[in-house]
Image (cartoon, rainbow, N blue to C red):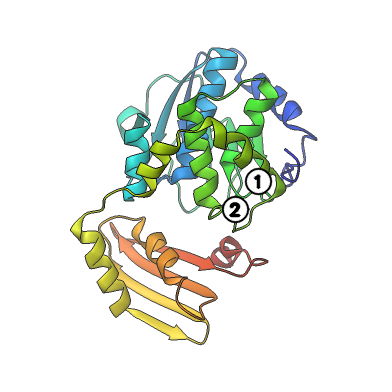
Amino acid sequence: MKGCESGETGQWDSDVEALRALRETMRGAESALLVTHDYPDPDAIGSALALAFLLEGSLGVTATLSHGGIIGRAENKAMVQLLSIDMKPLHEIYGGQYGVVALVDAQPGAGNLVLPPGLRPAVVIDHHAETRANLEGVPFVDIRPTCGATSTVLTGYLQAAGLTPDERTATALFYGIKADTMGLARAASDADVEAYLYLLPLADTKILAQIENAQVPLAYFRAFERALERTFIYDDVVVCNLGPMDWPDLAAEMADFLLRWEGARWVFCMGVFEEEIVLSVRTNEMEANAGHVVQD
């Protein structure tokens, strides 16, 4: 799509060429395991659902969606429930016979994905500029840091294949783009805008409203209280240490919330989930890349 080139791989000049290479990689496969990062967000979920739609509709390949952690955020839970998206825990299905393993919105070796020993993907599709990834020997790699969302990449694939997403898939893709780009206000390319406007009339806006206004448990509001008690301001930088968290997405939720603090330009929010440190960084600096700051 325009403004969302395959910049990091530099292999293709168009989605049509990328799709042709993907089909070649999938040749002979009857099934595929699609794996997102461990704690999938709307972009990961929407991208995986769209890839399944593409593989089944274009190649007749049966796809299984999977993740290695949990779906914790209320909106993300509502998304998979209201759109009837079946995402299986990776530990429950790993070892099954799959013709191809594909990583969606994730990369091998990245900090947000732990793959079982011996599981090596043949396909990697992502939009993050991940410096720690190990892509050696992966036949198909399409990483587009100029895209604001992986859902934009998959929308381009569907258009290149001549497939119009059904309402369920369009809704998931639209929400994936909207969530990852903050409604096109954060790191959105021309391609993200194009995909967003293309998907909007195809999406179920009533379900979108239900997802975005999902009910939350009491622990959610207590987490806000804890976050405010543990927040410190250093000029235009907001730092929050949540300590133990009930779900891993909480750091990102609190970072989004704290970025609204008057005068804040950067937010660093961290917490601990299952003995792992989770760090989420947010900025309202349009030219800055929070992901690069985390990696540095």
164 vs 229, left or right, is right
Q: Which quarter of the figure is the C terminus placed in? A: bottom right
x then y, percent, for residue 139: 65, 30
Q: Earlier in the sequence, mark 2 or mark 1?
A: 2
**In this view, which residue lies farthest toward the bottom?**
235
- Locate residue 239 relative to residue 189 in the image: left or right: left
Q: Residue 193: which numbered mark, if any?
A: 1
Query: In x, y percent, where is residue 295?
Result: 56, 63
Vertical placement of residue 95 versus 270, above or below: above
Pick the residue in front: 3 or 205. Answer: 205
Q: Position of residue 54 (x, y in %)?
A: 56, 22
Name above or below for residue 163 compared with residue 209: above
**Contact check, label 2 and label 1, Cβ < 8 Å:** yes
Q: Say which residue appears at 64% left-offset and 66% top-offset.
A: 286
Disc 2 versus disc 1: distance between alpha carbons? Answer: 7 Å
Give the crowd class for mark 2: few <14, some 14-19, many >=20 residues within 10 Å: some
The answer to whether residue 292 shows anywhere in this view is yes
Is residue 294 placed above or below 85 in the rendered structure?
Answer: below
Residue at 49% x, 29% y: name it.
169
Q: Type of residue at label 1?
A: Val
Residue found at x 65% / y 48%: 147
Name of the residue lying farthest toward the left: 218
Asked if residue 106 can be seen in this view, the reply is no
Report the front residue among 147 and 245. 147
The numbered dot on residue 184 is 2
Q: Amino acid at mark 2?
A: Leu
